[in-house]
Image (tube, rainbow, N blue to C red):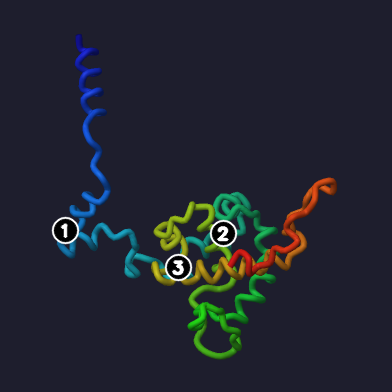
């Protein structure tokens, strides 16, 4: 008898009309300013450590392979082999694009120091890909605000693409019997 009631309840619930997402937005609009702010998925700057003492810095300075593979997908040797090539583009390009969305070449001796070092920016991009794009977790790991995280992710992703495009070890190789169809691929294709 008890099973019949459970089956009836399940059938009843399945036949109920589903609430559309546009009606859920009405709930959000009825919230006060403070209630909306509490539901914002960004981590406030006051809650974060400085990038120099962040969790990423601790991982980077420990040089522990297991942690590196877990966070970035690369072991220490592979990560450190990639850093000098990445740094070449990182130090010579501004993280802020001009009006045409082109990154501008800069002189590294001028202006104030950047918030993130080249190895931090490379780690940010690799960690972001491993965390399935979660910005709140990358904010906490690297100790940077939401806007800074977005800016450096966009910047670092483009630099990593350039770095890997010019690296023969990162080249995709096809079986010799298969015809290659990617001879026209350039970094601009993916940008």
Q: Point out which mark residue 31 bears.
A: 1
Dot 1 and dot 3 residues touching (CB under 8 Å): no
Write down the quadrant of residue 9 in the picture.
top left
Query: Which quarter of the rendered picture does the C terminus lie within?
Result: bottom right
137 or 178: nearer the viewer: 178
Identify residue for label 2: 126
Query: Which residue is outermost to the right?
Result: 176
Instruction: Identify which residue is drawn at 61% across, 59% down.
Output: 63
Query: Which quarter of the rendered picture does the N terminus lie within?
Result: top left
64 or 23: nearer the viewer: 23
| Element type where label 1 sits in the image | loop
Expressed as whole percent of the image width and height from the top left, the position of residue 104 reads 57, 83
Expressed as whole percent of the image width and height from the top left, the position of residue 114 reads 51, 79
Q: Taking 151 as reference, is 82 left or right?
A: right
| Label 1 Cα crowd, 10 Å radius (few <14 / some 14-19 / many 20+) | few
Q: Is residue 65 above or below residue 58?
A: above
| Element type where label 2 sits in the image | helix
Q: CA distance from mark 1 to mark 3?
A: 27 Å
Write down the quadrant of residue 92 in the picture.
bottom right
81 or 106: nearer the viewer: 106
Query: Which residue is outermost to the bottom?
Result: 110
- Of the residues tagged 2 and 3, which is closer to the observer? 3
Q: CA distance from mark 2 to mark 3?
A: 14 Å
Identify residue for label 3: 150
| Element type where label 3 sits in the image | helix
């Amino acid at each position: 008898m008890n099973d019949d009631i459970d089956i009836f309840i399940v059938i009843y619930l399945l036949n109920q009309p589903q609430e559309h997402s546009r009606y859920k937005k009405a709930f959000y609009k009825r919230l006060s300013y403070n209630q909306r702010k509490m539901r914002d998925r960004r981590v406030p700057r006051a809650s974060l450590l400085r990038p120099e003492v962040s969790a990423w810095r601790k991982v980077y300075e420990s040089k522990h392979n297991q942690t590196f593979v877990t966070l970035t997908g690369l072991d220490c040797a592979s990560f450190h082999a990639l850093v000098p090539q990445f740094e070449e583009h990182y130090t010579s390009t501004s993280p802020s694009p001009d009006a045409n969305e082109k990154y501008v070449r800069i002189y590294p001796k001028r202006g104030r120091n950047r918030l993130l070092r080249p190895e931090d920016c490379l780690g940010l991009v690799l960690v972001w890909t491993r965390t399935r794009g979660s910005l709140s977790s990358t904010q906490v790991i690297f100790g940077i605000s939401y806007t800074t995280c977005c800016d450096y992710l966009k910047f670092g992703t483009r630099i990593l693409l350039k770095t890997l495009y010019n690296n023969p070890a990162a080249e995709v190789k096809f079986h010799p019997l298969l015809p290659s169809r990617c001879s026209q691929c350039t970094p601009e294709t993916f940008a």
